[in-house]
Image (cartoon, rainbow, N blue to C red):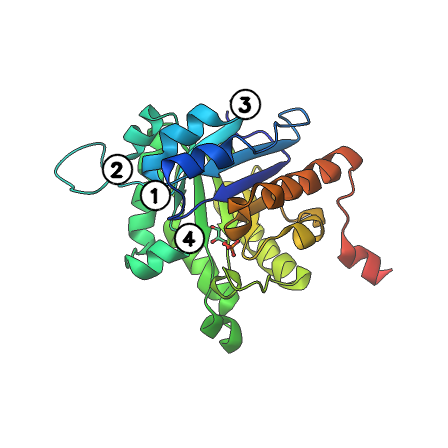
Amino acid sequence: MVVQGELFVIGNWKMHLTQQAATDLASTISDPKTSHDAVTIGIAPSFVALAAAKASRKSDDILIGGQDCYPVDEGAYTGSVSAAMLRDAGCSFVICGHSERRTHQQETSHFVREKAESAIKAGLHVILCVGENAGFREHGSYLSFVETQLRESLPASATRENLTVAYEPIWAIGTGKHASRTDIEEMHDHLKAVLHELLGEKIPRIIYGGSVKPNNALEIMSLPVVDGVLVGGASLDAAAFNAILDAAYQITSNQTRDDGRSKAAQ
Ligand code: 13P
């Protein structure tokens, strides 16, 4: 089992960084400071920078992941990379169904499920992304929209060991406007209930993504319903990503995870 941490912090480098820049950035990400049980760290470089990032990271405990995979092991699929190939390249996880792929490559939830199934079969941990756009949020149908996405994208073989769900509201990605703690709690609670219904007691982690920065990471990860973060822009800056990791270490070492709702109800 590669993902053991109470908190899972992942940098999604998207379509950024040359091999040299990936080498420089990977080499400045902090060594895991606490036991592997507390915080699991991952970085997802572009396919062509996987080897550079893998070779230059400070510790094997910083997991390397792909940003996408094609759901067939090998064959005539020009331009695609399979989960088995990612595993061979040293990846431990792969991101499936990111909203940027659902939008720009018109990926359906059915196709995302096939990708996730192939990744689990190849021995990779899946980061399964779901999230609504501003229209669904404003219309008020965001819970049912994301629930449907999750139901249709989730492989039958999903477990806590082989899959993590990432809730990434599209309106919060790259905008500097992160979801409020109420928004996050409402959605994570809802998705946890759906996962519980589908998979039973031991449900996958749910992490949050969308404008996670050093100045909000502590607040977001302190929420008991949040099992980590998926970071875009801030993961391209070593100081910012290390500050987010420090917030995760602070939370897991001080056990400062606190439920604001119960406080508010007191
Ligand atoms: P930002 O952190 O830049 O908003 O990106 C979030 C994201 O899409 C991570 O997958």
Image coordinates for residue 105, horizontal then vertical, percent = 28, 57
Q: Which residue is more in the foreground, 36 or 30?
A: 30
Residue drawn where x is 68% and y is 27% of the image: 34
Q: Which residue is more in the foreground, 215 or 162?
A: 215
Cα distance between the residues tagged 2 and 4: 25 Å
Q: Nearer the viewer, mark 2 or mark 3?
A: 3
Cα distance between the residues tagged 1 and 3: 23 Å
> Would you name the residue on which mark 3 appears?
59
Mark identifier at residue 68: 1
Q: Earlier in the sequence, mark 1 or mark 3?
A: 3
Q: Earlier in the sequence, mark 4 or mark 1?
A: 1
Q: Is residue 131 left or right of residue 122?
A: right
Q: Which residue is more in the foreground, 8 or 249?
A: 249
- Give the secondary structure at mark 4: helix
Instruction: Report the amino acid beneath label 2.
Output: Val
Q: Quarter holding the C terminus?
A: bottom right
Image coordinates for residue 117, horizontal then vertical, percent = 33, 38
Residue drawn where x is 83% and y is 62% of the image: 265
Q: Are marks 1 and 3 in contact (CB under 8 Å)?
A: no
> Would you name the residue on which mark 2 appears?
81
Q: Earlier in the sequence, mark 1 or mark 2?
A: 1
> Would you name the residue on which mark 4 appears?
151
